[in-house]
Amino acid sequence: MSDSKKFASLTIGDKTLELPIYSPTEGPDVIDIRKLYAQGDVFTYDPGFTSTAACDSTITYIDGAAGILLHRGYTIGELTEKSHYLEVCYLLLNGELPSAEELEHFEYRITRHTMLHEQMMNFFRGFRRDAHPMAIMTGVVGAMSAFYHDSLDITDPQQREVASVRMISKMPTIAAMAFKYSKGQPFVYPSNDLDFASNFLRMCFATPVEEYEVDPILSRAMDRIFTLHADHEQNASTSTVRLAGSSGANPFACIAAGIACLWGPTHGGANQACLEMLEEIGTVDRIPEYIARAKDKNDSFRLMGFGHRVYKNFDPRAVVLKENADEVLELLGIENNPKLQVAKALEAAALEDPYFKEKKLFPNVDFYSGIILEAMGFPTSMFTPIFALSRTVGWIAQWKEMLDDPQLKIGRPRQLYQGESQRDYVDVEDR
């Protein structure tokens, strides 16, 4: 961090503090409050950390008002149009786009690390058949630390690199096996002949008695879903990974913590909530009723998949994914799927409604990703696991960046205590 040439003055009683102000390459200035407690004997109060920068980062930048998402300076639109998921993985991990030789080597390493240790199959069989795939993924990823002892030392750059490759390559296999287990079908091992997205689709939908031929349109859509979810700055799950990592926890434990956080319905479960809403609406003729309910402040109903916590205009990822949604639905058809019919009609109705235009409640990435995954044949319980395997590279990139930060400290937020002051203990017979 460069030396600050600007300062903010804060007066507390008869004391005035000079707090450094730093200017990032993009985004608003940041006031450095690290010495606020030591010099002013006060804390700041920021529930949800919505106005607090907890780290330096060079990975991802978001301008929610303008609808901008950059990975290492490249727009998400350009990356999804011209690149693919594994190249974006390399970019996030290393800071620059790879040469042709570097990309070939990276893809080779990922492809040949997709198999799991065979004894890990016992972990899957230890879960109930109706276990949520996210529960399985959380447990299995955490258990990787019991199998891969040669990549647990976070002080060794080589071990960090090996752990990174293992998690990126094996996460699709874990997610696909969780899916197969929930369906009562045998596991399908990965194939080195397929690209990353096609391999995942085959592991999910092939069976020993019938091979699954991956359609290029579906593979491209799957790859874009992976790419669009690869990283999203300091969100809840990424912050969880960083917080866990700040204690020195091993990489598998840190990523398992991120998966657990992502499971929440207001984070990674948003696209599942969107499809559940479409199921509740049921038929196209009921859309006006639900749009009216969404406008009613006294009604608890909300349109899921519209608007975004960060993007106050439009979600740039949704703009990209809408094209893929149209292609997938044209390929697979929506005539026999009432849920997808409702989705297309709801999208059209909302985009034409002045209320939603005024409030800038546009369909977001969760809306379109849910539609695509539903059309492909994934149940809603698999939406968040797919999100998790996509986001793994972002978590790892953020985790590695944090470990290289000379200012790294174990995370320790403070609080605004509202409980009782010190009081005397009363013996039970006197209460």
Image: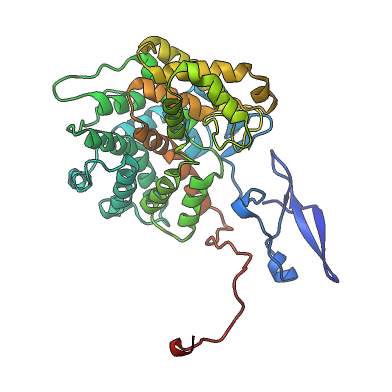
Q: Image point 69% across, 40% down: which residue?
A: 25
Q: Give the image location of residue 374, x and y in percent.
A: 38, 24
As drawn, 328 above or below 379: above
Q: Give the image location of residue 38, x and y in percent.
A: 70, 70
Q: Image point 56% across, 41% down: which residue?
A: 233
Q: Give the image location of residue 7, x and y in percent.
A: 81, 55
Quadrant in which residue 42 is drawn:
bottom right
Quadrant in which residue 276 is drawn:
top left
Q: Give the image location of residue 393, x and y in percent.
A: 44, 39
- Relative to 16, is 289 on the left or the right? left
Examine the rendering and report whether any part of residue 324 can be seen.
Answer: no
As drawn, 107 above or below 46: above
Q: How is the image coloured?
A: rainbow
Examine the rendering and report whether any part of residue 9 can be seen.
Answer: yes
Q: Residue furthest left?
A: 209
The total of numbered circles placed on residues is 0
Nearer to the camera, 343 or 327: 343
Nearer to the camera, 293 or 215: 293
- Relative to 263, is 76 on the left or the right? right
